[in-house]
Image (cartoon, grey):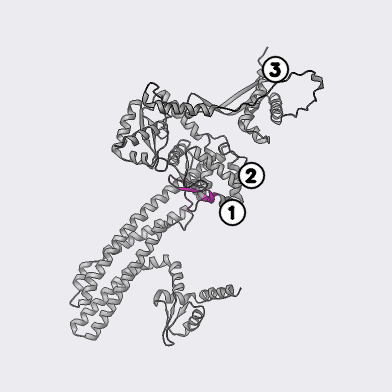
């Protein structure tokens, strides 16, 4: 076992970082190995911590072992509130980014996000430009920038700060890589949808067609 | 413009003769056989360099650019045709072999030779169709169906191709190689075709097909996952649009969901061991760098006493737009005993040249600068967010002002 990677993995987990192949490739590979992951878990177990993994298996994070303890419950609730605080603009950006991408697929861990794709989408369509302007009016992406390019840069900057994207390649290339935090977010969104009993848009449309 | 005109003429000619051209492409190895219906087509294609012929007596053959175009536009059709054709070509080959054996048994040598040729022709067409069918699947696997932008349509096309590949696989598995072995007879060429070439090609085709089915299945799984995520995002956004005040919560349940079980950060603080001589050099360097980074240039200013304040020129104080706005807001709050006023929402209304933080601070300071009695009449609610690292601290994200009902004397 590589003790340096063991150390960096454990410390990153304790700092509440989400470990994925994009943000921490060495630590991610380390946790992918069942034996090494068990070593980390054995270490964390003594402080009531474990290793959580997203449903798609691409993101690892630190979790509590006993979630019935009142302090733990309160910590989880506060973590959840923090995540959903700016959810709406984040979802609106997800939709914008999907339509801007060349493959029209939802953003997933490891995807390349190009600033130029966003820019050309905003320049091509007045609706998309309006969406972009609305995004930068939100608290999360607030910007007084006057150009599309500056608005997009502000959005990317916030997403990097929040750990959803990392910059890739040379500076100023406008290339970003999506992190495993999206996987964690999708898991939470799935829970929100089920808990709030929100129907799928498609289901609603199908039902409408039936009537 | 002449170039464009030529190109338009050429496209019109293809459109005009589409049926004959496609017939030649599908059924006559790209040849336009001499006939009444092909004369004008041949002339038009030769004119636009989309066909060629060596001698006047030879057939006109469609050129590569045109057949490439047909390859592209008929890909889907050809794959399905190839799949369907393979079954009938197998039957046809077997039938011709039966005729050949019958003729051979009767000593009808010329007939036997003819039926053997037909069997070969059917056999080689079968091999061609196998290659074509497989090539079609690899095209879709390489592109991942991304030429279709709509995710639902992409999934449907993927599912159709998977179904088609499975049917094709079932067809190939139904071919009885022992029958080929039995029918091979004593003709060495036929034996080679039936015992070696065809079984080998079908075996290769089956293994490539099984690879294709695996890939199509995983592509379908991937695109279905993407559809689920897209629907998830869209349905939540629609919910937000329908419910302005929607904030997800699970406060209504006592337990916490496992999916949200992500631990808060634990602070990892470290301290240098000042007594350890090993760190002495590093620590002294560090200490020196801190010293220099803290050194600042201090502007020198000498105060001079004011002899007569009345002589100093008066300066008009320009009202501060932020304070003005804050005072206006307080007037409205005092007058409206029912409403609650969010600092952030008001911020969006005023075109202020300051950030959120300064605006909220200005509002709170304006409240604090009021006379005690007035100040008691205004209630301030702070919307807070727990700091992700120092969880004992909270960040104020909004300030809500409301008029406090006066208590009865």
Question: Helix, strand, or loop for circle 3?
Answer: loop
The residue that disc 2 covers is: A146
**In the rendered structure, which disc, 2 or 1, sits on the residue that comes first in sequence?**
1
The quadrant holding residue B183 is: bottom left
Res A180 quadrant in image: top left
Q: Is mark 2 on a helix, strand or loop?
A: loop
Task: Identify the disc placed on residue A147.
Answer: none
Q: Position of residue B383 (x, y in %)?
A: 56, 27
Q: Mark 1 points at which residue?
A: A124
Give the crowd class for mark 1: few <14, some 14-19, many >=20 residues within 10 Å: few
Mark 3 and mark 2: Cα distance apart in space: 41 Å
Q: Are marks 3 and 1 in contact (CB under 8 Å)?
A: no
Q: What element carries label 1?
A: helix
Cα distance between the residues tagged 2 and 1: 17 Å
In percent of width and height, residue B130 lies at 32, 67
Left or right position of A160 against B362: left
The chain letter for the residue carrying disc 3 is: B
In this rendering, which labeled residue sits more in front, label 2 or label 1? 2
Residue B237 seen in render: no
Q: Which mark is residue B371?
A: 3
Q: In this view, does B364 lie to the left or right of B287?
A: right
Residue A202 shown in magenta: no
Q: Which residue is at 70% across, 17% downward?
A: B371
Q: In the rendered structure, which segment of residues is drawn in magenta?
A: A99-118
Of B292 and A166, the residue lying toward us: B292
Q: Position of residue A200 (x, y in %)?
A: 48, 44
Asked if both marks, 2 and 1, belong to the same chain, the answer given is yes
Quarter the C terminus of chain B occupies: top right
């Amino acid at each position: 076992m590589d003790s340096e990677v063991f150390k960096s993995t454990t410390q990153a987990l304790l700092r509440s970082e989400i470990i994925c192949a994009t943000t921490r490739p060495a630590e991610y590979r380390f946790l992918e190995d069942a034996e090494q992951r068990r070593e980390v878990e054995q270490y964390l177990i003594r402080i009531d911590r474990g290793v959580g993994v997203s449903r798609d298996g691409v993101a690892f994070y630190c979790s509590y072992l006993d979630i019935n303890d009142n302090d733990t419950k309160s910590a989880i609730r506060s973590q959840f509130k923090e995540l959903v605080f700016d959810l709406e603009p984040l979802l609106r950006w997800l939709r914008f980014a999907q339509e801007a991408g060349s493959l029209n697929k939802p953003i997933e861990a490891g995807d390349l996000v190009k600033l130029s794709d966003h820019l050309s989408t905003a320049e091509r369509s007045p609706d998309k430009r309006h969406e972009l302007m609305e995004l930068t009016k939100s608290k999360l992406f607030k910007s007084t920038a006057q150009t599309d390019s500056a608005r997009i840069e502000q959005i990317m900057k916030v997403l990097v700060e929040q750990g959803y994207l990392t910059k890739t390649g040379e500076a100023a290339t406008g290339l970003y890589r999506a992190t495993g935090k999206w996987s964690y977010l999708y898991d939470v969104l799935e829970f929100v949808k089920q808990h709030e009993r929100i129907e799928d848009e498609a289901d609603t449309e199908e039902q409408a067609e039936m009537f | 413009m002449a170039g464009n005109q030529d190109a338009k003429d050429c496209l019109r000619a293809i459109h005009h003769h589409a049926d004959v051209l496609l017939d030649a492409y599908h059924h006559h190895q790209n040849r336009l056989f001499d006939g009444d219906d092909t004369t004008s087509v041949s002339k038009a294609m030769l004119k636009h360099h989309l066909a060629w012929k060596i001698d006047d007596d030879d057939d006109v053959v469609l050129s590569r650019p045109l057949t490439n175009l047909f390859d592209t536009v008929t890909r889907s059709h050809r794959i399905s045709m190839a799949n369907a054709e393979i079954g009938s070509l197998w039957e046809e080959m077997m039938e011709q072999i039966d005729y050949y054996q019958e003729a051979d048994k009767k000593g009808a040598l010329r007939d036997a030779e003819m039926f053997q040729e037909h069997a070969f022709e059917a056999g080689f067409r079968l091999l061609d169709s196998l290659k074509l069918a497989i090539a079609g699947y690899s095209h879709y696997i390489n592109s991942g169906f991304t030429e279709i932008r709509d995710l639902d349509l992409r999934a449907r096309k993927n599912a159709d191709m998977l179904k088609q590949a499975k049917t094709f696989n079932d067809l190939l598995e139904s071919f009885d190689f022992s029958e080929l072995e039995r029918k091979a007879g004593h003709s060495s060429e036929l034996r080679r075709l039936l015992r070696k070439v065809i079984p080998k090609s079908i075996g290769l085709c089956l293994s490539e097909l099984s690879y294709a089915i695996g890939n199509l299945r995983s592509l379908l799984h991937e695109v279905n996952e993407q559809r689920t995520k897209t629907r998830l995002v869209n349905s939540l956004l629609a919910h937000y649009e329908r419910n302005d005040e929607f904030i997800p919560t699970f406060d209504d349940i006592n337990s916490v969901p496992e999916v949200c079980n992500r631990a808060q950060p634990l602070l990892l603080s470290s301290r240098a061991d000042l007594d350890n001589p090993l760190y002495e050099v590093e620590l002294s360097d560090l200490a020196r760098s801190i010293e220099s980074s803290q050194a600042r240039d201090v502007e020198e200013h000498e105060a001079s006493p004011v002899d007569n304040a009345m002589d100093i020129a008066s300066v008009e104080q320009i009202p501060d737009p932020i304070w003005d706005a804050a005072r206006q807001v307080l007037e409205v709050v005092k007058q409206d005993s029912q409403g609650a006023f969010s600092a952030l929402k008001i911020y969006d209304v005023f075109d202020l040249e300051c950030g959120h933080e300064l605006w909220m601070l200005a509002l709170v300071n304006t409240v604090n600068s009021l006379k005690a009695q007035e100040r008691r009449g205004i209630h301030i609610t702070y919307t807070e967010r727990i700091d992700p690292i120092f969880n004992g601290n909270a960040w104020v994200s909004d300030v809500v002002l409301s008029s406090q009902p006066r208590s009865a004397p």
